Image (spheres, grey):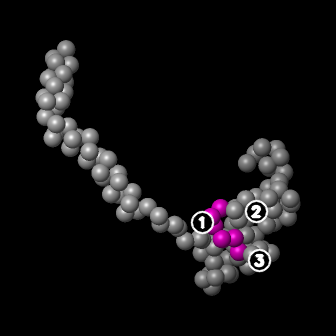
Amino acid sequence: MRFWEIGKRNLKELYRDPIALGFLLGMPVAFILIFGLAAGGQTAEPVTLGVVDEDQSQISQAFIDILDDVPVLEIKSTTYESPSQAEEALSNGELPAYLVVPNGFSRAIKEKQL
């Protein structure tokens, strides 16, 4: 019960001091605006992603097309025939990453295992 009395008293004191009330309410808004302006408007550079489509199905192609629509992903236009080719491109520095769509991907989607 004493807790509520102390809280009420502090709120009354705060209400009577408009400068403190202004700082209490204004500073968080000011920080949000400052940090929002400092970090806002920046866009991420696209990441090139190589794709190995082992499934070769309509569903796997639709999945790759969905990935291609993601703004920060730049899908490599030439897909690799095997993971070893993609791994070689990764080792040579041509790619930062690659994705393997395994055999049975469409079946797993249809059976809701993925």
Classed neighbour count for the residue bearing mark 3: other residues with Cα under 10 Å, few (<14), some (14–19), many (≥20): few
Mark 1 is on which residue type?
Answer: Val
**Res 72 label:** 1
Q: Is residue 9 above or below residue 109?
A: above
Query: What number of labels is visible?
Result: 3
Q: Is residue 65 magenta?
A: no
Q: Is residue 71 magenta?
A: yes
**Residue beneath the point at 18% across and 22% down:** 8
Dot 2 or dot 3, earlier in sequence: 2
Left or right: 95, with 102 as reference point: left
Q: Are marks 2 and 3 in contact (CB under 8 Å)?
A: no
What's the distance in space between the residues labelled 2 and 3, CA to CA? 13 Å
Q: Are marks 1 and 3 in contact (CB under 8 Å)?
A: no
Give whichever of 6, 28 is nearer the camera.
28
**Residue beneath the point at 66% across and 71% down:** 74
Label 2: which residue? Answer: 65
- Which of labels 1 and 3 is toward the front? 1
Magenta-drawn segment: 70-76
Classed neighbour count for the residue bearing mark 2: other residues with Cα under 10 Å, few (<14), some (14–19), many (≥20): few
Q: Residue 47: horizontal and vertical position, in percent?
A: 60, 71
SS at mark 2 in the image: helix
Q: Is residue 105 above or below residue 26?
A: below
Dot 1 or dot 3, earlier in sequence: 1
Dot 1 or dot 2, earlier in sequence: 2
**Residue beneath the point at 16% across and 18% down:** 5
Q: Is residue 69 visible?
A: yes
Q: Quadrant of residue 40?
A: bottom left
Q: Quadrant of residue 15?
A: top left
Label 3: which residue? Answer: 78
SS at mark 1 in the image: loop
